[in-house]
Image (cartoon, helix red, strand yellow):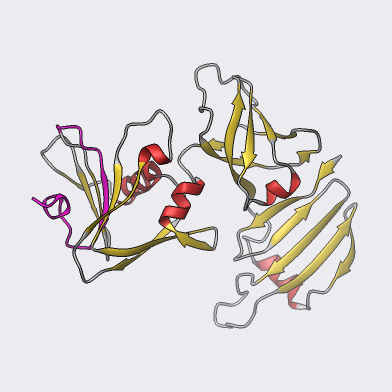
Amino acid sequence: MLFPIPIHLKDRGSIKFKALLYTVTKYNKLLPINEKTENDYIKGIKVEILGTEVYNNIDDNFIRSEQNSSNLEGETYNSFVGTVLEETTTYMIVEPNEDEEERKTADKIKINYGTDHIDFLYGIGRKVIINYTGYIKETYPAQIDTDNILINGYEEFELTVKTSENKNKVKVLNSKELYKNDIEYDLYYYGIDKVEVTINNTTMSLEEALRSGKITIDGLIIKANKNFPDAEVYKDGGSVQYNYDNYTIIKMHKIDGNRDVYIGTKDMTINSAIGE
């Protein structure tokens, strides 16, 4: 048997549940057909069995919206965060996070690779992002066929930073709390009360996102490098400063071995962050 799997459509919230014999699509707040018509959104449910529509409570605008919204059926994907429980060069077994839809299907999922990963193992205990299309096979463990696995969390996310009146430095966590067999470093906030991250239309604290594996500290720096390819590099071994509109990220890479990461106010520098 095959489980119905949720496919998130890139249209601000619609979800398609696809099984072998039927498909249920829950449309929610699609992109407007005419940008000047603010209320021209679609909500409703469509059910198809063997490709034949058997139920549809979507209003008449659905036809026009489906024809004009390129994102409606364009790129679809399934993804979830899981912890590696077992692995070889041909497969891994993961435990989906408690908040993932796939966890409702199975507490263990075997990921079958399309190619032999003879030169790379992910590491028992590592949290990874599994991207896949198709069906989840109803075995035990359940099974998914994919090679699309990310180790640095979701690549698309946005940070929101709330600054503090006090320019204090607060240790948030240590990398050893999150990752195994990794270089040890700390994450600090400087003059910051709160950092939130939005991923797939869901907002949570940055600490929660890091602990759940939805993003990683390395993923933060990878994105910062893409945003600022010409970021300032200090002559201290290679520390880098990334200046966003209302906050700053500094990745230490000092000669003495300091690899800490700071998220701070717009005026933060290396010297102010470390108190020199």
Q: Quadrant of the N terminus?
A: top right
Q: Residue furthest top?
A: 118
Q: Is residue 273 above or below residue 11?
A: above
Q: Nearer the viewer, residue 95 or 61?
A: 95
Q: Is residue 156 visible?
A: no
Q: Is residue 194 above or below residue 90?
A: below
Residue 129 placement: quadrant: top right
Q: Is residue 177 visible?
A: yes
Task: Point out the stretch of residues depicted in magenta.
Answer: 255-276
- Residue shown at the point (71%, 74%) measured from the top left: 43
Classify residue 263 as left or right of residue 84: left
Q: Is residue 265 above or below residue 137?
A: below
Rendered location of residue 127, percent (x, y): 52, 38
Q: Residue furthest left?
A: 276
Rendered location of residue 49, percent (x, y): 90, 55
Reply yes or no: does residue 260 show up in magenta. Answer: yes
Rendered location of residue 111, percent (x, y): 66, 31
Residue 34 placement: quadrant: bottom right
- Residue shown at the point (8%, 50%) measured from the top left: 276
- Residue shown at the point (50%, 17%) measured from the top left: 119
Q: Nearer the viewer, residue 229 or 120?
A: 120
Residue 85 placement: quadrant: top right
Reply yes or no: does residue 273 show up in magenta. Answer: yes
Task: State how many labels appear.
Answer: 0
